Amino acid sequence: MRGKGRIFVLVFSCLLIFWSCGKREEKEHKFRVGLVFDVGGRGDKSFNDSAYRGLERAKKELGIYYEYIEPGEGSDRESALRVLALRGFDIIFGIGFMFSDDIKKISKEFPNIKFACVDYTVKPGEKIPDNLAALKFREEEGSFLVGAIAGLLTKTDIVGFVGGMDIPLIHKFEAGYRAGVKYVNPEAKVLVAYAGVTGEAFKNPSKGKELALSQYSKGADIIYHASGSTGLGVFEAAREMKKLAIGVDSDQYWEAPGYVLTSMIKRVDESVFRTIKMALEGKFKGGVYEFGLKENGVGYVYDENNKNLIPEEVIRKVEKIKEKIIKGEIKVPKTREELKKWKI
């Protein structure tokens, strides 16, 4: 027994040494990516889940190692970023505009680590640190296209928009959508409502349902939401009222099959993947990076799931509009002030 015991201890020790070497090898040779999610975290079936797909793609195609942190209510953003920085990750992402101040502060404290922030708020005259990439999107362009789809397909000439937090970022979705509706249907009316003025507005499905039911009861037959998981309530209302809804950020068809007309795709996954690849290849540079229709950063869903809801004639018209936007023939508004030029 003593001999067998010695053999067991020897084998166990060898396995332990092998495992430890493997962990060291992973740390020494794998590119390490850290990411902190926005309010709502993984499972929001929208913004955060899109970022996660970017991580998964980078792991599969580039062989990176990643870890992520969910900051709960969002009050621990700075400490979450700091934990990853102290552990020496090669690049660290903050997902959401609310990371802007914290990630700029941490990036200055850790100049040898690369950072990236999705929807970073760039202040007038601000200099972005050399180790920080501000990833921004022209959400108004994708929203213009789904607005055109809604304007062409509405039967009541009344459509709706439900936003999450009432802030300039979400105003871009609203402005683009309203302009797209009016571009193809000048007589249409767009109802607008927001869930709140704090981060809670992005994770309140009951409020989303309440706002959507109100708009449907006023005659809207299509509602576009830009509200994170609050939008799950919009889909619930669409099912209940047997009306249509438009998803955001990710393809949200499966949240209410048959009732989701399309979704405005915001390719956060693409921006995360591209930034990781750029850093891995030694091509990372700090500064502002924008993703619009031209860069395939935004778009809309048209596939086997929803083609029965959207006639091919409508898609042909929308694709022509898309080309005009890319060529600069249509300048899509991104603020309420710019909407005034459209007499909206």
Image (cartoon, rainbow, N blue to C red):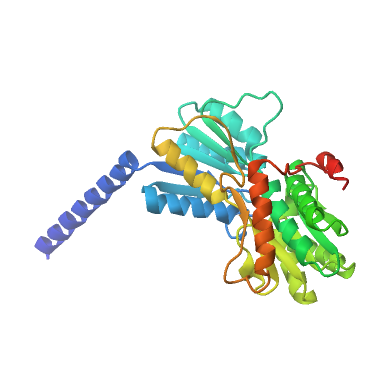
Percent position of residue 322, x then y: 65, 51
Q: Is residue 335 visible?
A: yes
Compared to 282, does 333 lie above or below?
below
Quadrant location, the N terminus: bottom left
The residue lying at 77 percent from left, 70 percent from top is 237
Quarter residue 193 falls in = bottom right
Along the horizontal axis of the image, is 275 left or right of 202? Answer: left
The residue lying at 64 percent from left, 69 percent from top is 255
Compared to 239, does 295 lie above or below?
above
Q: Is residue 89 visible?
A: no
The furthest residue to the right: 218
For this rendering, which residue is in front, 7 or 336? 336
Percent position of residue 252, x then y: 63, 64
For this rendering, which residue is in front, 126 or 320? 320
Percent position of residue 103, x then y: 59, 34
The residue lying at 43 percent from left, 49 percent from top is 58
Percent position of residue 210, x then y: 82, 65
